[in-house]
Structures are given as C-alpha cells and as structure tokens.
Amino acid sequence: MRVDIPKESPAINKRIQDIQLPPDSVLVSIVRQDEVIVPKGNTVLQPGDDIIALTLVGNEPQLLNLLVGNI
C-alpha cells in the first residue's frame, strides 16, 4: 500500500521503532521530496512523506490509522 503522511498524522516526528506496526507489516520505502529513504528504526516520519508499506489485507485499516489517523 502507498500512504501520504498528512501533517495531522499521529506518526509525525516519531521514529519508526516507536510506532507499533500491525503484525506482518513493514515500511519498505519513504519518498521525501526527491529523495528515496530506506526506513530504519531511527528514521523519523515527516509530513508529506510518501510511504510504501507491505501488510496483510486484514491489517490495512490498522496500519492506515497509525500512519494517517482516524479516517
């Protein structure tokens, strides 16, 4: 799945290691402006980040809630 991180996201300014991702979920890449970032535990999410993530279909709502907020 691809997710654009809005400025009101609960994940903003958090390190990936501090975000409790759903089981069987992984952040694959972050596109930040013209830069592609391979996420690591200490990578901090910023507004406007474009996240590519893999997860099970049943975990998509939980992952979206973590990255975007209540939808």
Image (tube, rainbow, N blue to C red):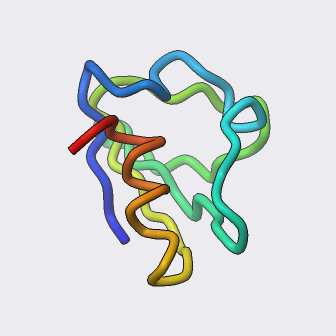
Could you say where residue 38 lies in the image, as x and y percent from the top left?
63, 53
Within the image, what quadrant is residue 70 found in? top left
Q: Looking at the image, which residue is at 33% across and 35% down?
A: 69
Residue 19 sits above or below residue 24 on the image: above
Q: Looking at the image, which residue is at 55% across and 47% down?
A: 37
Could you say where residue 46 lies in the image, as x and y percent from the top left?
42, 24
Could you say where residue 41 lies in the image, as x and y percent from the top left?
78, 39
Which is more toward the observer, 9 or 33? Answer: 9
Q: Quadrant of the N terminus?
A: bottom left
Q: Looking at the image, which residue is at 32% across and 64% down?
A: 2
Residue 33 sits above or below residue 23 on the image: above
Within the image, what quadrant is residue 18 found in? top right
Q: Residue furthest bottom?
A: 57
Residue 54 appears left or right of 15: left
Residue 15 appears left or right of 41: left
Residue 48 appears left or right of 61: left
Within the image, what quadrant is residue 24 found in? bottom right
Q: Looking at the image, which residue is at 27% across and 20% down?
A: 8
Could you say where residue 20 lies in the image, as x and y percent from the top left?
70, 43
The total of numbered circles placed on residues is: 0
Q: Quadrant of the C terminus?
A: top left
